[in-house]
Structures are given as structure tokens and as C-alpha cells.
């Protein structure tokens, strides 16, 4: 008799818990009269430097639209509700959050994260649930390997173009045309490495050394010694900021001072200048937004740059996120509804100039932004190539490493 | 009602609810149930070797990745039907587990744990550099492979039920007894003629099979793979946390633990960067309060409650009063 | 030749990083999954001090070490001590929980931007047998050796050190001898944190810091102590040097992209062939 009681009680307890949980699970957030837009971004984890600036850009677009009374649909204006989730830079979490946003929060469309490892899983979920997904800050060739896409869209730079800028910018100063590549084994490191090797001869450059290493490498002294021995005067790197910081310190200690040094994926954020101080000066990088380009709202974004601590790619991420959101909102208004098919079709018809530049999607759903080269000078990044009005002189040899 | 009858009734009810799920659950719930079911499978599979076997594997994430990649490669390069690739992936994971077990199972306790971690990380490093599997670019599951959300739900649900049933039957079998005797005192078991190595090997490879199959299903849901997320250490840590918090070496423990962790993740999703902090704090709090797992805590509580309730109805016997 | 020099120098840094890990395991059989966060946390504290005072990072250790040790003592006493008797799993889950709490705290307080502890000796070279290496590499070797020697002396000469070794050998017997085992455990954890502080600051000066840097250093630390012998102090130095050299040679012989694979394979091979490592399991 006692034993039976014990198990009855336990069963009752478990059942109560399950019932309670079931009541909370499945309670979908219905926003009445509001359009829900979701985004899963890396606010923590390895890609966290992108998170806050993506959020800033998306929020700016949302605030702008809501200040005007909301998006104009066929049956009246509706405000936009932005739901932001943190995927902790984990592709598995990103996919799970995408499903939550689409299916529980009822998001009519999702805005993207940064980098292919996050944007591709998000795109895949969009393809599964048949609802639109618009992203930026994801190099298009790498993103396209996850295709073909019917519902997903990407507006960012094309790696084929981006891997030319380093040579074009270096030609602004005198070098011996010998290049050393430092690439990590991440997907973009491998792809960029191949593209740079391909592009170098076209501009009269020669790759004399190609150092490839896993992410998380800390000691680069061997590679630096190799680059020095081979007499390289142009350095092009594709690595993450923590690794690049270690590399730069070791280069200075080894007295390796190239004429030009590009640090892609590393010297873009404001953190580069803050972390290295004077050592950061002279580092160059490819950039997808500069105020000198004269696209819409350049002055406004320059103001944001100052608030973020100075010119760097941080504000370019804000501009990119803002652009992606605006593309989505303009499409919603063009379609006059949030119906998935109509909205998706409307995105495909985008043909307008945004802060990032002219946006018009190709048949495979990508659109390319212009690319520039900038250089760190006195704690901020300035345009050095192409020679638009307001461009700074490219300083060589690299001041910080001298 | 006997205890067995009550438990059997509850299980039957749960199974009925599970298999009619898509009819009464919202689409969202059907979709996320997949994740819950894979958690249960992974936790229960780890419980077999970690809880009943006493071998604390930190490297089980490797089998998730192996299952994911095996099934994707088979789908890309052969014309085998989907279900055979899934089962084959489990077998591939088992085979690799068997090979790894030969050197590793000789190690005890923390050395085994670190050893499995080392093998798992070596596997990740290998996959990053292996051209056949696409290195860091990874692979895409062929677009011809299509499973609806309902299909995924049933597949994962069945796997979870199957794994739990298998572990349950094993724990009650003579083999299970031998496994637990090895866990409790390998030397003493050896004196009784139990070959510790073979017993642990069987558990390890069987555990890897379930994890491999789960990995295959995960790949089919994800549709794209790359090494870091396929071999993610998070799988290993989740498996361990769910089982330990639920109750190591019990059947209900992993199920309970999976449910708790899963619910926690769901509830905290909207808290952005605070969600990880809260998860960590809760983990520390729970394990501090219930090192034996919550299932054990619940049983104790139920026992005490039952004793108090049944004792309320009659005058306490002299020895009972003193004990209380 | 270059590889050997670099390997030995970095070995000193790796030893400093891994000492706390081996100490905690040797005394309490505790695998501290939050060790990486002890390293990085101390480095962040140093960063905070350095950015406000301009103090040299290594000098800031005079403030960082006591701060970190004081914070670590109650963690062991209140949270981990009761779990040590429950087997391997609960402390692992607890330290894992602590590590993710710490990582998130770092993000919230310091943002996830990569940071560097700047010092002139990190960006200046010194000539060693024909190779130019950063001065901080040599400093790290010196510090690593000094820490190992000091710890060894402490364990063998000081009364507290002997109490520690007694508790490591047999906690129950030690208790009967009047040793407050709970206090010894907590003090050990505090000491491990203090050692980790030195390692962490060296990491920040020589390389860089992010909230997640701790994880990769934890793994490296594991490799070092497995090779040297989990629980052996001199073993940590030997293990550090072996790992340092193996990383360099592995990169040269097999290609730099296999660098991780070489190190983890080495870990597994050593575990399988000689689990007690080079120096065995005794705590000295």
C-alpha cells in the first residue's frame, strides 16, 4: 500500500510539471497589428564583435520606420516589432532560433547575422519554412555555396572583387611586389588564400610565402622569420583579431616591417586600434562602406562612427545592417502585404541605392557592394583606395611596425 | 495498483501523446520537439556508458559529427535510401568507437575522460583539414532529400523511445548487471570472472551507435554541415549536464534532465546575452543542491512526503515517533 | 634549431599556465574545467588595472594575485568542497557551470573585443643563439621555472606544503592528524588561482585576450599536465617544454594546418602508452 502511494505521488508531481511546461510551451507571441521581424545575431561568443553593431543598424531602421507611423501596407500602416535573439556565435543555436522566430514569434521575415557559418544555417531554415531572409555582412561567394536559394537574399561584397583591392592599394606606393599571405584554415581563409594567389599575377605581384595555420594559433615566429627571409614587402592576412594581435606583436619584436600590411577579418573593428594603440597604425583592410562614397545618409553614419569611438568597420556593420533592414521594409511596402510569396517577389525586384550602395539582386539572390581599402592612421581608419575625394595618402612602410 | 502497473500506464500514456503529437501540437512545438528528442537520445546514450558503465566520456560529441558526416557523404555519393544511410551512420560511429575503445578503455576515470576529449578534438582537427569532407566549407545535404517537420518529429521521437527502451532493458538484463558490477568495482568483478574490457566495449560501441544515428538525423534537419558545429563540444557538455542533473545511472534521469535543460534553453532564448549567465548559475546551483541528480531528489522528497502522509492517518508507533 | 629554442621558451609559459591545473588535480582529484577562465579572468583584472594606472602588466600582478586568490577561496570552500566527495561528475558539471558564468561575465563587463596587455618587452626582440625571439618569451621561461621551483620548495619545506601533500595522499588520514582538510582544499584552489593569474597575465602580454580564450588554454593545459604527469609539479615544466617543442616540430614536419591534430594526437598517444606521464602522479 505504501509503495503504491509513493509512486502515485511521484507520478502526480511529474505530471504537474509536464502540464505546467506544456502550458508555457506553445504559447506563441501574437503581435496584433504589428509586423514581427526577427534576427538571430552573435551577441556573445567568437563573433560577438559583430553583434551590437548589427543590432544598432537594425534598430535604427526599425525606429525610423516606426517614427513615421509604421510600414504602409495595402490595408493601413503597421508598426514593426523587432525581436533580437543571441545565437552565441553557434550555428546550431542560430538555426534553432530561426525556427523559434519564424514559427513561435510569427516573424514574417528574418534579418541575418554575420559570416557564412551563421548566415548559411539561417538561410537554410528560411528555405525550409518558406519565408524571406535578408542578410548582409556575409561574403557572397561563400554564402552562395549553401544555395541554391529561393527565399534568402544577401547584399555584401564579392570576394572575387575584394581580393583585388590589396594589390591595387599596394600599387599606390613603391614595393618589390613580393607578397606573403597569412591565412587561417577557416573557410574564408582558404577561399581568400586561393583568390589572392589567383589575382596576384594579374596585378604584377608574386606570392613568395603562404603561411597557413589553424584558428587559435599563438606563436607565429616561424612564419614571420620565413616572410622576412623571403623579403616580402606586402603582407596580406586573413585571420581573427586575437590571432592577428599576437602576430602583430611578434612581427614588431622580429623587426619585420613590410611596406603595406592588410589584415582582413581582423583590423576591421574598432577593437584593433583600441587593443594595439600605436602598433595598429598603418594596418590596412578592405572596407564596404566609407562616407566619401557619397551614398545616402553618409553624414549620419559618420556621426555614428564618432559615437562608436572613431572611424572603423564597426560603423560599416551598422550601415550594412541598416541597409538590409531597409531593403526588407521597402519590399514589404512595395508588396503592400506581409504575405510570404508576395514579399519574397518584392525583395527580388529591389533596385535602389542604399547607404551601402546600389542594390539589385542577381538570379542567384546575391547583390554586390562596392569595395574600398582603408588604413589605420592615428587611431581611426581612412579611405586610401580608390582615390575618391577625401581619400588619405597610403602611408608606407607600415608606421606601427616601425 | 502495483508500482509496475502505474509506471506502465504512465509510459503508455506518454507514448500515445508522443505519437499523436503532430495532431495536437502547434507547428512550432513539432519543430522544436525534434531538438528535445535528440537531447533525450544523446543523454540516454551517454548514460549507458557514463552512468551504467561508469566511464566518463568527454568525447562523445565526436560520434554526433561522425553520424552527421557519414549520412551526408552516403547521400551524396551513393543512391542508398535515406533510412539505410541513417542506420549505416550509426554503425560507422560504432566501428570507430570500437577502434578508439581498444586503447582508451584501459584508462580509468579522469584519464579516460581526457583521452576521449583528446580523440574528439583530434577528430575535429582532422575534419577541418580533410578535403573529401569539404574541410571548413563543409557539405550540403542533397536537395533531393526532403523530410517534412512531421517526418523529422516521428524519426527523432522513435529514436528517443528506442534508445530509452534499449537502455532500460539493458539495465535490467544480466549484461547490465555485469556492466554495473564493473562500474562499481572492476577488480572485484574480475575476480568473479567478468571481463571488464569486453563489457565496457559493448556499452561504448552501443552508446556510439545511438549517438551516431542521432547525428545523422541532426544532419538531415540542418541540411548543411561544417566541422565546428557538427563536432561541437556543446553536444558533449549538454549530454553530460542533462544526464548528471537528471540523475546518473537511472532511466528517468536523462529524460528529466533533457527536459529541464531544453525548457531552460527555450525560456531563456529571449534574454539575449544574459541567457548563458543564467544557465551557468542554475547549473552550479542545481548540482550543488542535488549532486545525485534531480531524479534522486524527487524520489527522496516523494518518499518523505509519502511517509508523512501515511503517518498522519494513525497514531505513530513508539519507535516511529522517536525516529521522527 | 629555431623550433627547439621557441619550444623551450614557450614551454616555460605553458608551465606557468598549467601549474594551477595540476595542483588542483594532484591535491583534490578535481578536474577544474574553469581553469581557462581563471587565467583569462586574472588577465582581465590586470587589464582593468593597467588601463587605469598605466602600471606594467607584470607589476600589476602584485595586486591581481591577491585579488584572484581571495575570490577563489570561497568558490572552493562553498561550492566545490561538498562536491568533491561525490565522484568525478558533479565537480565537472559545477566547474563547467562556473566557466560559462565567468565567460558571460567577461563579455558583459569587458565586451567581446580582443584585448592586449601592452608592454615593451612583448614587442622587442632579443637574440638567442642566432634567433630573434620576443623578449617576453625569455621572461616567460624564467617565470615558469621560478614558479615551479618555488612551488616545489613550498610543498616540501613549508608546513602548509606538507599539509597539502598529506591531504593529497589520504584526506581521511590527514584529517585524523588534525589537518583542516576543507581549509587546505580551499587554500589549494586559491593558490592555483594565484598561479593561474601569472599565467594569464603572461598570455595577455605575449598574445591576446578574448572572453573565450580560456577554453583553448584549458585544452593546452590538459595536454601539458597529461604529458608531465597529472599532479606532478616538475612534470608540468617538462610537459610544457615537450608540448612547446612538439607544436613547433609538428608544424614543421606535418604542415602548420595540422598543428592542432599533432598536439591532440600526442595527448592521446601519451595517455594510452604512459598515462602517468613523464614524472608520475606524485605531488612534488
Image: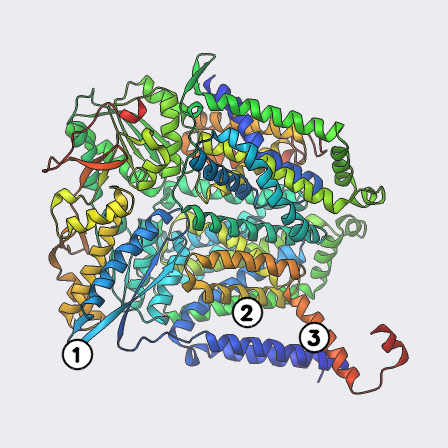
| Direction bottom: furthest residue | B313
Secondary element type, mark 1: loop
Front position in the image: B195 or B45: B45
Q: Quadrant of residue A128?
A: bottom left
Q: Chain of mark 2?
A: B
- Mark 3: give few (<14), some (14-19) or many (20+) Cα within 10 Å: many
Q: Quadrant of residue B24?
A: bottom left
Which of the two discs, 3 and 2, labels the residue nearer the N terminus? 2
Residues at marks 1 and 3 on the same chain: no
Q: Chain of mark 3?
A: B
Query: Can residue B197 be seen?
Result: yes
- The residue tagged 1 is A75
Cβ atoms under marks 3 and 2 closer than 8 Å = no
Mark carried by residue B302: 3
Nearer the observer: mark 2 or 1; the answer is 1
- Mark 1: give few (<14), some (14-19) or many (20+) Cα within 10 Å: few
Front position in the image: A19 or A290: A290
- Mark 2: give few (<14), some (14-19) or many (20+) Cα within 10 Å: some
* Mark 1 to mark 3 CA distance (whole Å): 58 Å
Nearer the observer: mark 1 or 3; the answer is 1
| Direction top: furthest residue | C130
Q: Horizontal and vertical percent for residue B149?
A: 38, 70
Q: Chain of mark 1?
A: A
Q: Horizontal and vertical percent for residue A350?
A: 13, 60
Amino acid at each position: 500500500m505504501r509503495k503504491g502511494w509513493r509512486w502515485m505521488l511521484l507520478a502526480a508531481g511529474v505530471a504537474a510539471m509536464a502540464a505546467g511546461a506544456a502550458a508555457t510551451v506553445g504559447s506563441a507571441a501574437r503581435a496584433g497589428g504589428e509586423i514581427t521581424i526577427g534576427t538571430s545575431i552573435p551577441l556573445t561568443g567568437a563573433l560577438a564583435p559583430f553583434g551590437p553593431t548589427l543590432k544598432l543598424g537594425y534598430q535604427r531602421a526599425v525606429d525610423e520606420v516606426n517614427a513615421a507611423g509604421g510600414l504602409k501596407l495595402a490595408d493601413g500602416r503597421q508598426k514593426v516589432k523587432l525581436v533580437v535573439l543571441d545565437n552565441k556565435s553557434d550555428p546550431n543555436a542560430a538555426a534553432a532560433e530561426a525556427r523559434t522566430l519564424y514559427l513561435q514569434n510569427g516573424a514574417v521575415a528574418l534579418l541575418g547575422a554575420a559570416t557564412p557559418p551563421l548566415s548559411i544555417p539561417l538561410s537554410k531554415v528560411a528555405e525550409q519554412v518558406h519565408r524571406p531572409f535578408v542578410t548582409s555582412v556575409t561574403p557572397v561567394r561563400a554564402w552562395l555555396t549553401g544555395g541554391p536559394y529561393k527565399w534568402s537574399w544577401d547584399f555584401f561584397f564579392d570576394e572575387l572583387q575584394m581580393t583585388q583591392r590589396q594589390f591595387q592599394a599596394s600599387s599606390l606606393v613603391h614595393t618589390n611586389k613580393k607578397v606573403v599571405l597569412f591565412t587561417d584554415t577557416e573557410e574564408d581563409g582558404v577561399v581568400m588564400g586561393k583568390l589572392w594567389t589567383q589575382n596576384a599575377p594579374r596585378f604584377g605581384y608574386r606570392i613568395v610565402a603562404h603561411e597557413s595555420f589553424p584558428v587559435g594559433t599563438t606563436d607565429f615566429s616561424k612564419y614571420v622569420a620565413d616572410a622576412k627571409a623571403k623579403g616580402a614587402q606586402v603582407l596580406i592576412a586573413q585571420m581573427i583579431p586575437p590571432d592577428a594581435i599576437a602576430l602583430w606583436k611578434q612581427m614588431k619584436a622580429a623587426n619585420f616591417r613590410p611596406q603595406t600590411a592588410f589584415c582582413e577579418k581582423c583590423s576591421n573593428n574598432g577593437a584593433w586600434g583600441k587593443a594595439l594603440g600605436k602598433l595598429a597604425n598603418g594596418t590596412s583592410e578592405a572596407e564596404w562602406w566609407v562616407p566619401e562614397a557619397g551614398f545616402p545618409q553618409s553624414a549620419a553614419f559618420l556621426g555614428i562612427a564618432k559615437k562608436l569611438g572613431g572611424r572603423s568597420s564597426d560603423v560599416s556593420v551598422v550601415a550594412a545592417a541598416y541597409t538590409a533592414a531597409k531593403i526588407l521594409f521597402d519590399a514589404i511596402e512595395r508588396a503592400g502585404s506581409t504575405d510570404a510569396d508576395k514579399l519574397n517577389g518584392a525583395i527580388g525586384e529591389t533596385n535602389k541605392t542604399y547607404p551601402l550602395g546600389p542594390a539589385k539582386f542577381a538570379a542567384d539572390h546575391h547583390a554586390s557592394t562596392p569595395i574600398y581599402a582603408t588604413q589605420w592612421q592615428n587611431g581611426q581608419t581612412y579611405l586610401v583606395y580608390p582615390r575618391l575625394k577625401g581619400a588619405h595618402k597610403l602611408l608606407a612602410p607600415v608606421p606601427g611596425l616601425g | 495498483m502495483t508500482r509496475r502497473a502505474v509506471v506502465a500506464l504512465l509510459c503508455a500514456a506518454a507514448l500515445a501523446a508522443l505519437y499523436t503529437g503532430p495532431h495536437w501540437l502547434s507547428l512550432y512545438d513539432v519543430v522544436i520537439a525534434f531538438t528535445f528528442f535528440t537531447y533525450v537520445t544523446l543523454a540516454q546514450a551517454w548514460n549507458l556508458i557514463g552512468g551504467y558503465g561508469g566511464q566518463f566520456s568527454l568525447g562523445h560529441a565526436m560520434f554526433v559529427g561522425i553520424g552527421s558526416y557519414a549520412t551526408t557523404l552516403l547521400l551524396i555519393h551513393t543512391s542508398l535510401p535515406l533510412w539505410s544511410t541513417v542506420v549505416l551512420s550509426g554503425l560507422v560511429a560504432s566501428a570507430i568507437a570500437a577502434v578508439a575503445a581498444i586503447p582508451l578503455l584501459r584508462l580509468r576515470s579522469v584519464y579516460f575522460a581526457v583521452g576521449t576529449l583528446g580523440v574528439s578534438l583530434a577528430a575535429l582537427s582532422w575534419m577541418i583539414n580533410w578535403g573529401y569532407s569539404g574541410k571548413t566549407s563543409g557539405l550540403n545535404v542533397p536537395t533531393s532529400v526532403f523530410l517534412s517537420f512531421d517526418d523529422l518529429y516521428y524519426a527523432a521521437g522513435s529514436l528517443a523511445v528506442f534508445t530509452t527502451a534499449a537502455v532500460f532493458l539493458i539495465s535490467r538484463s544480466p549484461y547490465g548487471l555485469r556492466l554495473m558490477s564493473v562500474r562499481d568495482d572492476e577488480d572485484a568483478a574480475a575476480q568473479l570472472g567478468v571481463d571488464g574490457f569486453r563489457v565496457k566495449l559493448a556499452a561504448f560501441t552501443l552508446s556510439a551507435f545511438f549517438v551516431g544515428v542521432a547525428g545523422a538525423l541532426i544532419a538531415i534537419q540542418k541540411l548543411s554541415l561544417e566541422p565546428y558545429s557538427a563536432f561541437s563540444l556543446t553536444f558533449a557538455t549538454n549530454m553530460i549536464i542533462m544526464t548528471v542533473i537528471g540523475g546518473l545511472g537511472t532511466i528517468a534521469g536523462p529524460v528529466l534532465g533533457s527536459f529541464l535543460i531544453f525548457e531552460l534553453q527555450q525560456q531563456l532564448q529571449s534574454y539575449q546575452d544574459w541567457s548563458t549567465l543564467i544557465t551557468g548559475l542554475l547549473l552550479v546551483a542545481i548540482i550543488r543542491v542535488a549532486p545525485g541528480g534531480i531524479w534522486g531528489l524527487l524520489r527522496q522528497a516523494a518518499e518523505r512526503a509519502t511517509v508523512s502522509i501515511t503517518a498522519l492517518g494513525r497514531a505513530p508507533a513508539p519507535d516511529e515517533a522517536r525516529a521522527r | 634549431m629555431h623550433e627547439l629554442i621557441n619550444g623551450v621558451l614557450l614551454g616555460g609559459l605553458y608551465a606557468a599556465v598549467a601549474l594551477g591545473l595540476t595542483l588542483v588535480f594532484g591535491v583534490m582529484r578535481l578536474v577544474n574545467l574553469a581553469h581557462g577562465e581563471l587565467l583569462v579572468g586574472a588577465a582581465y583584472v590586470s587589464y582593468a588595472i593597467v588601463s587605469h594606472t598605466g602600471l606594467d602588466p607584470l607589476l600589476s600582478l602584485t595586486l591581481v594575485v591577491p585579488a584572484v586568490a581571495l575570490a577563489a577561496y570561497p568558490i572552493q570552500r562553498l561550492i566545490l568542497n561538498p562536491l568533491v566527495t561525490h565522484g568525478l561528475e558533479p565537480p565537472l558539471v559545477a566547474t563547467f557551470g562556473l566557466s560559462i558564468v565567468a565567460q558571460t561575465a567577461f563579455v558583459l563587463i569587458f565586451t567581446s573585443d580582443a584585448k592586449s596587455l601592452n608592454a615593451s618587452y612583448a614587442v622587442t626582440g632579443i637574440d638567442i643563439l642566432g634567433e630573434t625571439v620576443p623578449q617576453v618569451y625569455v621572461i616567460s621561461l624564467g617565470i615558469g621555472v621560478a614558479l615551479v621551483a618555488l612551488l616545489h620548495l613550498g610543498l616540501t619545506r613549508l608546513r602548509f606544503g606538507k599539509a597539502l601533500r598529506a591531504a593529497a595522499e589520504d584526506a581521511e588520514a590527514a584529517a585524523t592528524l588534525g589537518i583542516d582538510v576543507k581549509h587546505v582544499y580551499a587554500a589549494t584552489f586559491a593558490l592555483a588561482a594565484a598561479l593561474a593569474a601569472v599565467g594569464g597575465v603572461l598570455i595577455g602580454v605575449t598574445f591576446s585576450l578574448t572572453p573565450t580564450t580560456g577554453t583553448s588554454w584549458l585544452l593546452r593545459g590538459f595536454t601539458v599536465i597529461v604529458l608531465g604527469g597529472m599532479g606532478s609539479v616538475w612534470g608540468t615544466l617538462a610537459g610544457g617544454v615537450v608540448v612547446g617543442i612538439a607544436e613547433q616540430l609538428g608544424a614543421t614536419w606535418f604542415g602548420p594546418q595540422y598543428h592542432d591534430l599533432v598536439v591532440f594526437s600526442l595527448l592521446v598517444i601519451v595517455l594510452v602508452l604512459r598515462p602517468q606521464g613523464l614524472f608520475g602522479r606524485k605531488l612534488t
